[in-house]
Image: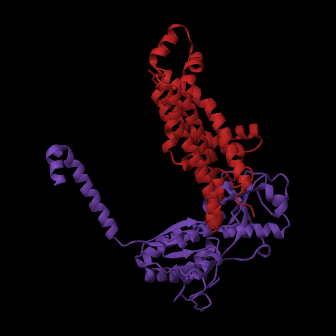
Chain colours: A purple, B red
Amino acid sequence: MRTSTFDTTRRNAARPARLALLGLILVGSVAINAQTPLRIAAAADLQPVLPALLDQFQQQTGIHAEATYQASAALTAQILNGAPFDIFLSADLGYPKRLIDSGVADTAGVVAANGFSDSSTPVTYAKGTLVLWTRKDSHWPTPSLETLRDPALQRLAIANPDRAPYGKAAMAALTTLKLADALKPKLVTAENISQTAQFAETGNADAGLISLTSAMTPHLTSIGSYFIIPKDLYPPIEQGAVLIMRSTQRQNAHKFLDFLLSAPVQRQLARSGLTPVRWPQ
Amino acid sequence: MNWIDWQAFALTLKLAAVTTAILLACAVPLAAWLVLSRSRLRPVVEALTGLPLILPPTVLGFYLLVLLGPRTGIGRAIAQVLGHPLAFSFAGLVVGSVLYSLPFAVQPLVAGFSAVDTALLDAARLLGAGPVRLVRTLLIPLAGRSLLTAAILSFLHTMGEFGVVLMLGGDIPGSTRTLSIVLYNQVESFDYAASNRTALVLLLLCLAALALVYARPRVLEGRSEGRNG
Protein backbone atom coordinates (compact mmCIF):
# COMPACT_ATOMS: atom_id res chain seq x y z
CA MET A 1 0.00 0.00 0.00
CA ARG A 2 1.11 3.50 -0.67
CA THR A 3 1.02 4.44 3.00
CA SER A 4 3.38 1.71 4.09
CA THR A 5 5.99 2.66 1.51
CA PHE A 6 5.68 6.15 2.77
CA ASP A 7 6.09 4.93 6.33
CA THR A 8 9.22 2.87 5.77
CA THR A 9 11.03 5.48 3.78
CA ARG A 10 10.18 8.54 5.81
CA ARG A 11 8.81 7.14 9.00
CA ASN A 12 10.49 9.46 11.47
CA ALA A 13 9.88 12.60 9.56
CA ALA A 14 6.31 11.65 8.79
CA ARG A 15 5.15 10.86 12.30
CA PRO A 16 4.77 14.38 13.76
CA ALA A 17 3.24 15.58 10.52
CA ARG A 18 0.74 12.73 10.56
CA LEU A 19 -0.14 13.37 14.16
CA ALA A 20 -0.74 16.99 13.36
CA LEU A 21 -2.87 16.02 10.39
CA LEU A 22 -4.86 13.60 12.50
CA GLY A 23 -5.38 16.34 15.05
CA LEU A 24 -6.61 18.68 12.37
CA ILE A 25 -9.02 16.09 11.01
CA LEU A 26 -10.35 15.46 14.52
CA VAL A 27 -10.84 19.14 15.24
CA GLY A 28 -12.37 19.58 11.80
CA SER A 29 -14.85 16.76 12.21
CA VAL A 30 -15.90 18.00 15.62
CA ALA A 31 -16.55 21.38 14.06
CA ILE A 32 -18.55 19.78 11.27
CA ASN A 33 -20.51 17.64 13.68
CA ALA A 34 -21.42 20.68 15.71
CA GLN A 35 -24.66 22.15 14.49
CA THR A 36 -24.38 24.09 11.26
CA PRO A 37 -25.08 27.70 12.08
CA LEU A 38 -28.20 29.38 10.87
CA ARG A 39 -26.97 31.46 7.97
CA ILE A 40 -28.46 34.90 7.52
CA ALA A 41 -28.00 37.07 4.47
CA ALA A 42 -28.40 40.56 5.88
CA ALA A 43 -28.63 43.99 4.30
CA ALA A 44 -25.58 46.09 5.12
CA ASP A 45 -27.59 48.56 7.24
CA LEU A 46 -28.02 45.73 9.76
CA GLN A 47 -24.28 45.39 10.29
CA PRO A 48 -24.27 47.68 13.34
CA VAL A 49 -27.47 46.11 14.73
CA LEU A 50 -27.53 42.39 14.11
CA PRO A 51 -24.40 41.03 15.87
CA ALA A 52 -25.76 41.87 19.34
CA LEU A 53 -29.14 40.41 18.39
CA LEU A 54 -27.52 37.18 17.19
CA ASP A 55 -25.74 36.79 20.53
CA GLN A 56 -28.99 37.33 22.33
CA PHE A 57 -30.75 34.86 20.04
CA GLN A 58 -28.13 32.24 20.83
CA GLN A 59 -28.50 32.84 24.58
CA GLN A 60 -32.27 32.47 24.37
CA THR A 61 -32.51 29.52 22.00
CA GLY A 62 -29.08 27.93 21.86
CA ILE A 63 -29.14 28.38 18.10
CA HIS A 64 -25.95 29.78 16.67
CA ALA A 65 -26.55 32.15 13.77
CA GLU A 66 -24.09 33.85 11.47
CA ALA A 67 -24.72 36.81 9.22
CA THR A 68 -23.24 38.00 5.95
CA TYR A 69 -23.65 41.70 5.25
CA GLN A 70 -23.90 43.14 1.76
CA ALA A 71 -26.08 45.27 -0.44
CA SER A 72 -29.54 43.71 -0.75
CA ALA A 73 -29.18 43.19 -4.49
CA ALA A 74 -25.81 41.50 -4.08
CA LEU A 75 -27.32 39.03 -1.63
CA THR A 76 -30.31 38.48 -3.89
CA ALA A 77 -28.02 37.63 -6.81
CA GLN A 78 -26.13 35.20 -4.62
CA ILE A 79 -29.27 33.51 -3.31
CA LEU A 80 -30.68 33.21 -6.83
CA ASN A 81 -27.45 31.44 -7.72
CA GLY A 82 -27.68 28.98 -4.86
CA ALA A 83 -25.88 30.65 -1.95
CA PRO A 84 -26.50 28.54 1.16
CA PHE A 85 -28.48 30.99 3.28
CA ASP A 86 -31.44 30.17 5.47
CA ILE A 87 -32.89 33.65 5.88
CA PHE A 88 -32.67 36.85 3.88
CA LEU A 89 -33.12 40.16 5.69
CA SER A 90 -33.34 42.74 2.95
CA ALA A 91 -33.36 46.52 3.27
CA ASP A 92 -36.39 46.72 0.99
CA LEU A 93 -39.38 44.63 -0.09
CA GLY A 94 -38.51 44.43 -3.80
CA TYR A 95 -35.54 42.09 -3.63
CA PRO A 96 -37.11 39.53 -1.28
CA LYS A 97 -40.26 39.69 -3.41
CA ARG A 98 -38.12 38.89 -6.41
CA LEU A 99 -36.80 35.79 -4.63
CA ILE A 100 -40.35 34.70 -3.84
CA ASP A 101 -41.37 35.22 -7.47
CA SER A 102 -38.37 33.19 -8.61
CA GLY A 103 -39.50 30.33 -6.39
CA VAL A 104 -36.46 30.24 -4.13
CA ALA A 105 -37.96 31.89 -1.05
CA ASP A 106 -41.25 32.19 0.78
CA THR A 107 -42.67 33.31 4.10
CA ALA A 108 -44.99 30.38 4.73
CA GLY A 109 -45.94 30.15 8.38
CA VAL A 110 -44.53 33.54 9.34
CA VAL A 111 -47.04 35.80 10.97
CA ALA A 112 -46.48 39.37 9.87
CA ALA A 113 -46.69 42.37 12.15
CA ASN A 114 -50.27 43.04 11.12
CA GLY A 115 -51.12 39.48 12.09
CA PHE A 116 -51.49 38.60 8.45
CA SER A 117 -49.76 35.54 7.05
CA ASP A 118 -49.23 35.24 3.34
CA SER A 119 -46.47 33.04 1.98
CA SER A 120 -45.97 35.16 -1.13
CA THR A 121 -45.22 38.50 0.56
CA PRO A 122 -41.99 39.39 2.38
CA VAL A 123 -42.49 40.00 6.09
CA THR A 124 -41.66 43.59 7.02
CA TYR A 125 -39.47 43.55 10.12
CA ALA A 126 -38.42 47.21 10.35
CA LYS A 127 -38.22 50.49 8.51
CA GLY A 128 -35.01 52.27 7.71
CA THR A 129 -34.12 55.93 8.03
CA LEU A 130 -31.82 57.90 5.76
CA VAL A 131 -29.52 60.51 7.31
CA LEU A 132 -26.93 62.96 6.09
CA TRP A 133 -23.71 62.41 8.02
CA THR A 134 -20.64 64.63 8.25
CA ARG A 135 -17.51 64.61 10.35
CA LYS A 136 -17.39 67.14 13.16
CA ASP A 137 -14.05 68.40 11.85
CA SER A 138 -15.48 69.02 8.36
CA HIS A 139 -16.90 72.31 7.03
CA TRP A 140 -20.33 71.17 8.14
CA PRO A 141 -20.15 70.12 11.79
CA THR A 142 -23.94 70.23 11.96
CA PRO A 143 -25.28 69.03 8.61
CA SER A 144 -28.62 70.04 7.17
CA LEU A 145 -30.30 70.09 3.78
CA GLU A 146 -28.35 73.30 3.16
CA THR A 147 -25.15 71.23 3.28
CA LEU A 148 -26.32 69.49 0.13
CA ARG A 149 -26.78 72.84 -1.59
CA ASP A 150 -23.39 74.19 -0.51
CA PRO A 151 -21.07 74.58 -3.52
CA ALA A 152 -18.13 73.82 -1.20
CA LEU A 153 -19.40 70.24 -0.93
CA GLN A 154 -17.10 68.36 -3.28
CA ARG A 155 -17.93 64.73 -2.72
CA LEU A 156 -21.11 63.18 -1.43
CA ALA A 157 -21.11 59.45 -0.77
CA ILE A 158 -24.25 57.46 -1.49
CA ALA A 159 -24.87 53.73 -1.76
CA ASN A 160 -25.31 52.31 -5.24
CA PRO A 161 -28.90 53.26 -6.17
CA ASP A 162 -29.24 50.22 -8.43
CA ARG A 163 -28.40 47.78 -5.72
CA ALA A 164 -28.75 49.22 -2.27
CA PRO A 165 -32.20 50.32 -1.07
CA TYR A 166 -30.63 53.18 0.91
CA GLY A 167 -28.90 54.32 -2.27
CA LYS A 168 -32.22 54.28 -4.07
CA ALA A 169 -33.77 56.29 -1.24
CA ALA A 170 -30.85 58.74 -1.38
CA MET A 171 -31.33 59.30 -5.11
CA ALA A 172 -35.08 59.71 -4.58
CA ALA A 173 -34.47 62.33 -1.89
CA LEU A 174 -31.98 64.22 -4.07
CA THR A 175 -34.44 64.11 -6.95
CA THR A 176 -37.26 65.46 -4.77
CA LEU A 177 -34.95 68.24 -3.63
CA LYS A 178 -34.17 68.92 -7.32
CA LEU A 179 -30.50 68.44 -6.51
CA ALA A 180 -29.90 65.22 -8.41
CA ASP A 181 -28.51 66.88 -11.53
CA ALA A 182 -26.41 69.44 -9.68
CA LEU A 183 -24.91 66.83 -7.37
CA LYS A 184 -24.41 64.11 -9.98
CA PRO A 185 -20.75 64.99 -10.66
CA LYS A 186 -20.08 65.06 -6.93
CA LEU A 187 -21.55 61.67 -6.10
CA VAL A 188 -19.30 58.81 -5.14
CA THR A 189 -21.08 55.50 -5.14
CA ALA A 190 -20.31 52.86 -2.54
CA GLU A 191 -20.97 49.16 -2.79
CA ASN A 192 -23.41 49.14 0.09
CA ILE A 193 -24.53 51.39 2.91
CA SER A 194 -21.68 50.33 5.23
CA GLN A 195 -19.11 51.35 2.66
CA THR A 196 -20.96 54.64 2.19
CA ALA A 197 -20.47 55.37 5.87
CA GLN A 198 -16.83 54.33 5.59
CA PHE A 199 -16.24 56.76 2.68
CA ALA A 200 -17.54 59.62 4.81
CA GLU A 201 -15.97 58.38 8.06
CA THR A 202 -12.47 58.33 6.54
CA GLY A 203 -13.02 61.87 5.25
CA ASN A 204 -12.53 60.74 1.67
CA ALA A 205 -16.03 62.03 0.99
CA ASP A 206 -17.22 65.32 2.54
CA ALA A 207 -20.55 63.88 3.56
CA GLY A 208 -22.57 60.72 3.18
CA LEU A 209 -26.22 59.79 2.87
CA ILE A 210 -26.08 56.82 5.19
CA SER A 211 -28.37 54.70 7.34
CA LEU A 212 -29.42 55.89 10.78
CA THR A 213 -28.19 52.50 12.05
CA SER A 214 -24.64 53.43 11.05
CA ALA A 215 -24.94 57.04 12.20
CA MET A 216 -26.07 55.89 15.65
CA THR A 217 -23.06 53.66 16.31
CA PRO A 218 -20.88 54.96 19.15
CA HIS A 219 -17.94 55.54 16.82
CA LEU A 220 -19.83 57.61 14.25
CA THR A 221 -21.67 59.61 16.89
CA SER A 222 -18.37 60.45 18.54
CA ILE A 223 -16.66 61.77 15.41
CA GLY A 224 -19.60 63.12 13.43
CA SER A 225 -23.17 64.33 13.43
CA TYR A 226 -26.21 63.45 11.40
CA PHE A 227 -29.30 65.11 10.06
CA ILE A 228 -32.40 62.99 9.53
CA ILE A 229 -33.57 63.40 5.94
CA PRO A 230 -37.27 64.36 6.10
CA LYS A 231 -39.33 61.24 5.46
CA ASP A 232 -41.50 62.92 2.87
CA LEU A 233 -38.51 63.28 0.54
CA TYR A 234 -38.18 59.58 -0.26
CA PRO A 235 -40.39 56.48 -0.35
CA PRO A 236 -40.23 54.55 2.94
CA ILE A 237 -37.38 52.06 3.31
CA GLU A 238 -39.50 49.08 4.32
CA GLN A 239 -37.25 46.18 5.17
CA GLY A 240 -38.54 42.69 4.40
CA ALA A 241 -37.51 39.19 5.41
CA VAL A 242 -37.97 35.87 3.59
CA LEU A 243 -37.09 32.26 4.29
CA ILE A 244 -34.97 30.48 1.72
CA MET A 245 -36.75 27.37 0.51
CA ARG A 246 -33.55 25.36 0.08
CA SER A 247 -32.81 25.77 3.80
CA THR A 248 -32.54 22.63 5.89
CA GLN A 249 -33.11 24.63 9.07
CA ARG A 250 -36.59 25.85 8.45
CA GLN A 251 -37.65 25.53 12.08
CA ASN A 252 -34.71 27.54 13.38
CA ALA A 253 -35.24 30.13 10.69
CA HIS A 254 -38.82 30.50 11.90
CA LYS A 255 -37.58 30.87 15.46
CA PHE A 256 -35.29 33.66 14.36
CA LEU A 257 -38.04 35.60 12.60
CA ASP A 258 -40.30 35.19 15.65
CA PHE A 259 -37.45 36.53 17.75
CA LEU A 260 -36.89 39.45 15.36
CA LEU A 261 -40.57 40.39 15.49
CA SER A 262 -40.86 39.96 19.25
CA ALA A 263 -41.62 43.01 21.40
CA PRO A 264 -38.26 43.31 23.19
CA VAL A 265 -36.27 42.96 20.00
CA GLN A 266 -38.47 45.41 18.13
CA ARG A 267 -37.94 47.90 20.94
CA GLN A 268 -34.22 47.31 20.68
CA LEU A 269 -34.34 48.02 16.93
CA ALA A 270 -35.78 51.43 17.73
CA ARG A 271 -32.73 52.19 19.85
CA SER A 272 -30.41 51.17 17.00
CA GLY A 273 -31.83 53.40 14.31
CA LEU A 274 -34.58 51.27 12.81
CA THR A 275 -38.29 51.99 13.07
CA PRO A 276 -40.08 48.98 14.54
CA VAL A 277 -43.10 47.60 12.72
CA ARG A 278 -44.65 46.03 15.76
CA TRP A 279 -45.18 47.32 19.29
CA PRO A 280 -43.95 50.81 18.62
CA GLN A 281 -43.24 52.77 21.76
CA MET B 1 -28.59 50.86 -25.53
CA ASN B 2 -24.85 50.45 -25.84
CA TRP B 3 -23.49 47.05 -26.66
CA ILE B 4 -21.01 47.55 -23.86
CA ASP B 5 -20.15 50.54 -21.69
CA TRP B 6 -17.75 52.24 -24.10
CA GLN B 7 -16.89 54.98 -21.63
CA ALA B 8 -15.76 52.36 -19.13
CA PHE B 9 -14.00 50.48 -21.90
CA ALA B 10 -12.00 53.57 -22.86
CA LEU B 11 -11.32 54.40 -19.23
CA THR B 12 -10.06 50.88 -18.54
CA LEU B 13 -7.68 51.02 -21.50
CA LYS B 14 -6.52 54.48 -20.44
CA LEU B 15 -5.90 53.35 -16.87
CA ALA B 16 -4.01 50.29 -18.09
CA ALA B 17 -1.94 52.35 -20.55
CA VAL B 18 -1.02 55.08 -18.05
CA THR B 19 -0.20 52.49 -15.39
CA THR B 20 1.93 50.47 -17.81
CA ALA B 21 3.87 53.54 -18.93
CA ILE B 22 4.61 54.58 -15.35
CA LEU B 23 5.42 51.01 -14.37
CA LEU B 24 7.90 50.48 -17.18
CA ALA B 25 9.62 53.74 -16.36
CA CYS B 26 10.02 52.66 -12.72
CA ALA B 27 10.46 48.93 -13.24
CA VAL B 28 13.41 49.03 -15.65
CA PRO B 29 15.77 50.80 -13.24
CA LEU B 30 14.38 48.81 -10.32
CA ALA B 31 14.84 45.46 -12.06
CA ALA B 32 18.30 46.44 -13.27
CA TRP B 33 19.26 47.37 -9.72
CA LEU B 34 17.89 44.05 -8.43
CA VAL B 35 19.98 42.17 -10.98
CA LEU B 36 23.19 44.21 -10.79
CA SER B 37 23.27 45.17 -7.14
CA ARG B 38 25.20 43.27 -4.49
CA SER B 39 23.58 45.26 -1.71
CA ARG B 40 22.31 43.48 1.39
CA LEU B 41 19.04 45.28 0.92
CA ARG B 42 18.42 43.52 -2.38
CA PRO B 43 16.36 40.60 -0.99
CA VAL B 44 14.25 43.02 1.03
CA VAL B 45 13.58 45.25 -1.96
CA GLU B 46 12.82 42.23 -4.12
CA ALA B 47 10.39 40.93 -1.50
CA LEU B 48 8.73 44.34 -1.31
CA THR B 49 8.25 44.54 -5.07
CA GLY B 50 6.85 41.00 -5.12
CA LEU B 51 4.50 41.67 -2.22
CA PRO B 52 1.48 42.79 -4.27
CA LEU B 53 1.46 39.34 -5.91
CA ILE B 54 0.22 37.78 -2.70
CA LEU B 55 -1.11 40.79 -0.83
CA PRO B 56 -4.91 40.95 -0.69
CA PRO B 57 -6.04 43.95 -2.76
CA THR B 58 -8.15 44.95 0.22
CA VAL B 59 -4.96 45.59 2.21
CA LEU B 60 -3.78 47.97 -0.48
CA GLY B 61 -7.22 49.54 -0.74
CA PHE B 62 -7.31 50.07 2.99
CA TYR B 63 -3.93 51.76 3.08
CA LEU B 64 -4.72 53.99 0.14
CA LEU B 65 -8.08 54.96 1.57
CA VAL B 66 -7.04 55.53 5.17
CA LEU B 67 -3.28 56.09 5.24
CA LEU B 68 -3.34 58.30 2.16
CA GLY B 69 -6.79 59.68 2.99
CA PRO B 70 -7.40 63.32 3.90
CA ARG B 71 -7.06 62.63 7.63
CA THR B 72 -3.31 62.01 7.53
CA GLY B 73 -0.37 64.29 6.82
CA ILE B 74 0.65 62.41 3.67
CA GLY B 75 -2.95 62.39 2.51
CA ARG B 76 -3.28 66.15 2.99
CA ALA B 77 -0.03 66.72 1.11
CA ILE B 78 -1.32 64.62 -1.78
CA ALA B 79 -4.63 66.48 -1.74
CA GLN B 80 -2.71 69.77 -1.88
CA VAL B 81 -0.78 68.67 -4.94
CA LEU B 82 -3.72 67.09 -6.77
CA GLY B 83 -6.36 69.53 -5.59
CA HIS B 84 -8.48 66.63 -4.36
CA PRO B 85 -8.00 63.51 -2.20
CA LEU B 86 -6.57 60.43 -3.86
CA ALA B 87 -9.70 58.36 -3.40
CA PHE B 88 -12.48 58.53 -6.00
CA SER B 89 -10.19 59.88 -8.70
CA PHE B 90 -8.41 58.57 -11.75
CA ALA B 91 -5.09 59.57 -10.14
CA GLY B 92 -5.98 57.43 -7.13
CA LEU B 93 -6.65 54.44 -9.34
CA VAL B 94 -3.33 54.99 -11.14
CA VAL B 95 -1.46 55.02 -7.81
CA GLY B 96 -3.29 51.89 -6.69
CA SER B 97 -2.71 50.14 -10.00
CA VAL B 98 0.99 51.00 -10.14
CA LEU B 99 1.49 49.48 -6.70
CA TYR B 100 -0.75 46.54 -7.42
CA SER B 101 0.81 45.62 -10.79
CA LEU B 102 4.41 46.36 -9.81
CA PRO B 103 5.53 42.71 -9.62
CA PHE B 104 4.02 42.02 -13.04
CA ALA B 105 6.39 44.58 -14.50
CA VAL B 106 9.43 43.92 -12.33
CA GLN B 107 9.55 40.13 -12.30
CA PRO B 108 9.68 39.47 -16.06
CA LEU B 109 12.35 42.15 -16.32
CA VAL B 110 14.40 40.63 -13.52
CA ALA B 111 14.13 37.24 -15.21
CA GLY B 112 15.09 38.73 -18.58
CA PHE B 113 17.97 40.77 -17.23
CA SER B 114 19.29 37.82 -15.21
CA ALA B 115 19.45 35.74 -18.37
CA VAL B 116 21.92 38.15 -19.95
CA ASP B 117 25.38 36.60 -19.99
CA THR B 118 27.37 37.85 -16.99
CA ALA B 119 30.57 37.65 -19.05
CA LEU B 120 29.17 40.38 -21.29
CA LEU B 121 28.29 42.51 -18.27
CA ASP B 122 31.74 41.98 -16.74
CA ALA B 123 33.44 42.87 -20.02
CA ALA B 124 31.36 46.03 -20.32
CA ARG B 125 32.20 46.94 -16.73
CA LEU B 126 35.92 46.41 -17.39
CA LEU B 127 35.65 48.73 -20.33
CA GLY B 128 34.29 51.35 -17.97
CA ALA B 129 30.55 51.19 -18.59
CA GLY B 130 28.46 52.56 -15.72
CA PRO B 131 25.12 51.09 -14.65
CA VAL B 132 23.06 53.39 -16.90
CA ARG B 133 25.08 52.39 -19.93
CA LEU B 134 24.87 48.69 -18.94
CA VAL B 135 21.09 48.95 -18.88
CA ARG B 136 20.83 50.96 -22.08
CA THR B 137 23.29 49.13 -24.27
CA LEU B 138 23.19 45.59 -22.90
CA LEU B 139 20.22 44.70 -20.71
CA ILE B 140 17.43 46.38 -22.67
CA PRO B 141 18.57 45.29 -26.15
CA LEU B 142 19.24 41.73 -25.00
CA ALA B 143 16.12 41.39 -22.89
CA GLY B 144 13.70 43.22 -25.15
CA ARG B 145 11.31 40.32 -25.02
CA SER B 146 10.94 40.57 -21.26
CA LEU B 147 10.18 44.26 -21.66
CA LEU B 148 7.26 43.33 -23.89
CA THR B 149 6.14 40.63 -21.45
CA ALA B 150 6.34 43.10 -18.57
CA ALA B 151 4.31 45.66 -20.52
CA ILE B 152 1.59 43.22 -21.55
CA LEU B 153 1.30 41.62 -18.11
CA SER B 154 1.11 45.00 -16.33
CA PHE B 155 -1.48 46.17 -18.82
CA LEU B 156 -3.62 43.05 -18.39
CA HIS B 157 -3.29 42.92 -14.65
CA THR B 158 -4.37 46.55 -14.39
CA MET B 159 -7.28 45.94 -16.74
CA GLY B 160 -8.51 43.11 -14.58
CA GLU B 161 -8.01 44.91 -11.29
CA PHE B 162 -11.09 44.85 -9.12
CA GLY B 163 -10.58 44.88 -5.38
CA VAL B 164 -8.56 48.07 -5.21
CA VAL B 165 -10.92 49.87 -7.59
CA LEU B 166 -13.94 48.72 -5.61
CA MET B 167 -12.51 50.02 -2.36
CA LEU B 168 -11.02 53.22 -3.70
CA GLY B 169 -12.99 54.12 -6.79
CA GLY B 170 -16.47 55.21 -5.78
CA ASP B 171 -17.83 54.03 -9.15
CA ILE B 172 -17.71 57.40 -10.93
CA PRO B 173 -18.51 57.12 -14.66
CA GLY B 174 -15.63 58.35 -16.78
CA SER B 175 -13.13 58.57 -13.97
CA THR B 176 -13.22 55.44 -11.81
CA ARG B 177 -15.84 53.12 -13.31
CA THR B 178 -13.72 50.46 -15.02
CA LEU B 179 -14.97 47.47 -17.00
CA SER B 180 -14.53 45.05 -14.12
CA ILE B 181 -16.72 47.33 -11.98
CA VAL B 182 -19.27 47.59 -14.80
CA LEU B 183 -19.38 43.82 -15.00
CA TYR B 184 -19.85 43.56 -11.24
CA ASN B 185 -22.68 46.11 -11.39
CA GLN B 186 -24.33 44.24 -14.24
CA VAL B 187 -24.13 40.88 -12.47
CA GLU B 188 -25.50 42.38 -9.28
CA SER B 189 -28.32 44.04 -11.19
CA PHE B 190 -29.25 40.68 -12.74
CA ASP B 191 -28.47 41.97 -16.22
CA TYR B 192 -26.88 38.74 -17.38
CA ALA B 193 -27.07 39.60 -21.09
CA ALA B 194 -25.00 42.75 -20.58
CA SER B 195 -22.73 40.89 -18.13
CA ASN B 196 -22.08 38.33 -20.84
CA ARG B 197 -21.01 40.97 -23.30
CA THR B 198 -18.73 42.77 -20.85
CA ALA B 199 -17.21 39.51 -19.66
CA LEU B 200 -16.67 38.37 -23.22
CA VAL B 201 -14.85 41.58 -24.13
CA LEU B 202 -12.58 41.25 -21.09
CA LEU B 203 -11.99 37.57 -21.78
CA LEU B 204 -11.10 38.08 -25.44
CA LEU B 205 -8.85 41.06 -24.72
CA CYS B 206 -6.95 39.12 -22.08
CA LEU B 207 -6.72 35.98 -24.20
CA ALA B 208 -5.45 37.87 -27.24
CA ALA B 209 -2.85 39.76 -25.24
CA LEU B 210 -1.64 36.67 -23.42
CA ALA B 211 -1.41 34.81 -26.71
CA LEU B 212 0.86 37.63 -27.82
CA VAL B 213 3.11 37.02 -24.80
CA TYR B 214 3.36 33.33 -25.55
CA ALA B 215 3.64 33.62 -29.32
CA ARG B 216 6.35 36.23 -29.29
CA PRO B 217 9.40 34.33 -27.89
CA ARG B 218 9.48 31.68 -30.59
CA VAL B 219 9.28 34.30 -33.31
CA LEU B 220 12.19 36.15 -31.76
CA GLU B 221 14.21 33.04 -31.16
CA GLY B 222 13.83 32.07 -34.77
CA ARG B 223 15.22 35.40 -35.85
CA SER B 224 18.15 35.68 -33.51
CA GLU B 225 19.36 32.20 -32.89
CA GLY B 226 22.50 31.57 -30.92
CA ARG B 227 22.16 34.97 -29.31
CA ASN B 228 22.87 33.66 -25.87
CA GLY B 229 25.33 31.04 -27.10
Q: Is residue B31 above or below residue B191?
A: above
User: Total of numbered circles in the picture?
Assistant: 0
* Residue A170 x, y percent position in the rendering: 74, 67
- Among the 4 quarters of the image, the one containing residue B60: top right
Residue at image position (66%, 51%) is A202
Residue located at (53% from left, 7% from top):
B127
Furthest residue to the bottom? A116
Between A95 and A58, the one nearer to me in the picture? A95
Tell whether A12 sits left or right of B83: left
Image quadrant occupied by the N terminus of chain A: bottom left
Residue B211 visible within the image: yes
Front one among B3 and B154 = B3
Horizontal placement of A148 versus A76: left or right? right
**Residue, far top:** B127
Q: Position of residue B38 (x, y in %)?
A: 46, 20
- Work out whether residue B166 can be spotted: no
Q: Residue at x 61, y 39 (%)?
A: B98
- Say which residue appears at 84% left-offset and 61% top-offset: A181
Q: Is residue B223 above or below residue A150?
A: above
The C terminus of chain A, quarter of image: bottom right
Near-viewer residue (B111 or B22): B111
Please say if A44 is above or below A270: above
- Of B146 and A33, nearer the camera is B146
Quarter where residue A208 is shown: bottom right
Q: Position of residue B118 (x, y in %)?
A: 45, 18
Q: Residue B19 location, x and y as percent? A: 65, 39
